Amino acid sequence: MDSVVCVKRVPDTETKVQVGPDGRRIQASGVNHVLNPYDEYAVEACLQAREKAGSGEVTVLSLGPAEAAQTIRQALAMGADRGVLLKTDPACDYYMDPLSVAHALAARLKTMRLDLLWFGKLAIDDQSYAVGPAVATLLGLPCVTEVAEFAALPGRATATRVVEGDRVRMEVDLPAVFCASKGLNEPRFASLKGIMSAKKKPLETVDLAQGTARVEVVALELPPARQAGRWIGKGVEAVPELVRRLREEAKVL
Amino acid sequence: MSLDFALSDEQQALGEAIATMTKRFAGRREEFIQMILKEHRFPEELWQALCEVGLLGCLVPEEYGGNGMGLLAMAMGLEQLARRGLGNALLVLGAMDACCIVRCGNEEQKRRLLPRLASGEDKYCFAVTEPNAGSNTFRIETLARKEGATYRLSGEKTFITGADVADRMLLVARTTSAAECEAQGLPKAFGLSLFIVDTKARGIDLKPIPTHGIEGMIQYTVHLDGVEVAQEDLIGEPDQGAMALFNSLNPERILAAASALGMTDYLLERSCEYARGRVLFGQKPIAAYQAIQHPLARIKAQSEAVRLVTYKAAWAFDQGHHPGQVGPFANMAKYLAAEMAVDACDRAIQTHGGYGFSEEYGIIYLWTTARLLRTAPISQEMVLNFIGEHVLELPRSY
Ligand SMILES: Cc1cc2nc3c(=O)[nH]c(=O)nc-3n(C[C@H](O)[C@H](O)[C@H](O)COP(=O)(O)OP(=O)(O)OC[C@H]3O[C@@H](n4cnc5c(N)ncnc54)[C@H](O)[C@@H]3O)c2cc1C
């Protein structure tokens, strides 16, 4: 069972981002980066599939700046076997829209042997939900998004989607594309032992040819600051007052 | 000529591993903090996660189930944890115990004890302090008498952190009493021995001491009344434990310094964030006032210096330098880090005004934690005594 998992380096949800001086990007300095949380589920799904099959390789593919190698190493430390970084040119930092990213990934993926191709359902920075399905389209592979349960059989896989209260179980021929949703599994932590062995695993870096921007970010703004919460009261006695305010002040009832 | 301060890839990966791990629990932060502060318990899930990442395995070689990454890695790990307002004293105590077993234990003991210590399955605490022997370890009175293939331990240990949650403790006892040493003209360092004691063994009685400083854990007085310990659980040679003990005090000091560093970063971050958002006069936030800003800037500068000494101490330990050479840096790091953490907490409180004292903001809880570092694991006075005597080669006053 060979899998490829596409991962993205994203700003840590716990760091407070600031808009950069150009007003179109977040300020890079002082921001911690992490492996996109949805991609952690995807990595874990690949590791479990490999363990269950008893053979196969898990390859981690990422498109991003040189630092994204750290993110790939994180997945290698969790247990993946090898990594490929499609390195973007720091001199040309235009916004890469989801389809441009998908084209770049697909070009490389065409050369790789795989049964499973995993993505996180979204990257927490751009939240476009698009790259996984776009790659599937470009490769002509079936695609299941919002995967909350998964089992791979030889040549086939079952995946359960959880959407708006529904649970839809699907069967799909392999190779296929899957996009992980929260709760798919409990991703293992990258252990220090894993970090040590990740150092010795192969990580190939490919310079990505410069493209042209088709979608441009015009402005980036922070959402308005959330107002501080207010104590209405405590216990059952507070309920009528809470209802009154929700109706009259917040106008949500 | 070159001196490289760049972090290696693994060191960076280690930081990210801790970030990823703590992020996973971000949604339950409040619940955990409540448990730590109000129930004086450390969340078991968080402990498991710390062990899964492998922090406890840093000082344990791979052949005994650890990861062998060393003290610098562990110090950086603890620093990262503290930067997120978290910490666990059993990590420090367990690391110290591991260090003792690795250096002085026999092959059988290493195989039996280390894998479960490194994985966190067995929790370890550390017991040296006694009511009549704090700063002066040689005065301990807990006695271990040999009876055939076992030892019988009697005495009293105090301030023992986590004795209730730990499965075992590394305990320092005398196998030759101070009086016997004196009668035979032996040095006072003679007669100390190290034992691995099961905390649930018969003859052990724990009494909690309500104490502040290490949140999420309780200190105990441990009474030992004829506690039976098998000969196999004596670590190192009988009567020769002093050297092993002092060797593992260096890592404890270095790890305490690393925690103080992380805590300082955390306090600075919290202070800057609060000061940026607090507007009182005109349009400018209090962060713009130099009376608020400069102390924070000063602490930031200080922290970079303390980081260098701390890393250097850990590096010297990992290089296998003689404990006598690691000692000066370990002591200096602990001294500087403790002063800095107290200062950082003081300024954080001042920056927060009245909210610095509110439970909601939680800064005040860190005050005792920071302040404790001036007193334990070793007092600032004893650190200065060490530097005066062993680095400056000045005479002892005591
Ligand atoms: C929260 C907490 C947790 C602890 N956890 C543990 C634990 O897990 N295991 C354990 O074994 N111990 C533990 N301790 C004990 C701690 O290590 C001791 O409290 C510390 O070493 C100081 O010893 P003491 O309290 O007996 O003070 P003393 O030794 O009585 O010292 C009192 C004062 O006199 C000063 N002084 C003493 N001698 C000299 C000298 N020669 N020159 C100058 N000044 C001197 C000291 O610096 C100090 O200020 C803990 C303590 C606390 C508060």
Image (spheres, coloured by chain):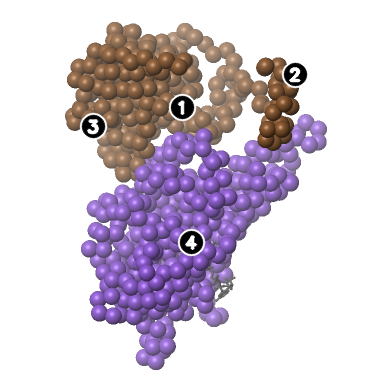
Chain colours: A brown, B purple
Pointer 3 residue Cβ closer than 8 Å to ligand 1: no
Cα–Cα gap, marks 4 and 2: 54 Å
Cα–Cα gap, marks 4 and 1: 39 Å
Q: Quadrant of the C terminus of chain B?
A: bottom right
Which chain does the numbered disc 1 sit on?
A
x and y, in percent, of residue B157 in the image: 47, 71
**Mark number for residue B161?**
4
**Mark number for residue A248?**
2
Amino acid bearing label 2: Glu
Q: Are marks 2 and 1 in contact (CB under 8 Å)?
A: no
Q: Nearer the viewer, mark 3 or mark 1?
A: 3
Q: Nearer the viewer, mark 2 or mark 3?
A: 2
Does residue B190 sit above or below A54 in this rendering? Answer: below
Q: Are marks 3 and 1 in contact (CB under 8 Å)?
A: no
Cα–Cα gap, marks 2 and 1: 40 Å
Cα–Cα gap, marks 3 and 4: 41 Å
How many neighbours does mark 3 have within 10 angstroms: few (below 14), some (14-19), or many (20 or more)?
Answer: few
Pointer 4 residue Cβ closer than 8 Å to ligand 1: yes
x and y, in percent, of residue B103 in the image: 31, 64
Residue labelled with disc 3: A51
Amino acid bearing label 4: Thr
Residue labelled with disc 1: A10
| Closer to the camera in the image, A89 or B81 | B81
Q: Earlier in the sequence, mark 3 or mark 1?
A: 1
Ligand 1 sits in quadrant: bottom right
Q: Residue at x 56, y 40 (%)?
A: B30
Q: Secondary structure at mark 4?
A: strand
Q: Residue at x 37, y 33 (%)?
A: A186
How many neighbours does mark 1 have within 10 angstroms: few (below 14), some (14-19), or many (20 or more)?
Answer: many
Which chain does the numbered disc 4 sit on?
B
Residue farthest along the bottom direction in this orientation = B183
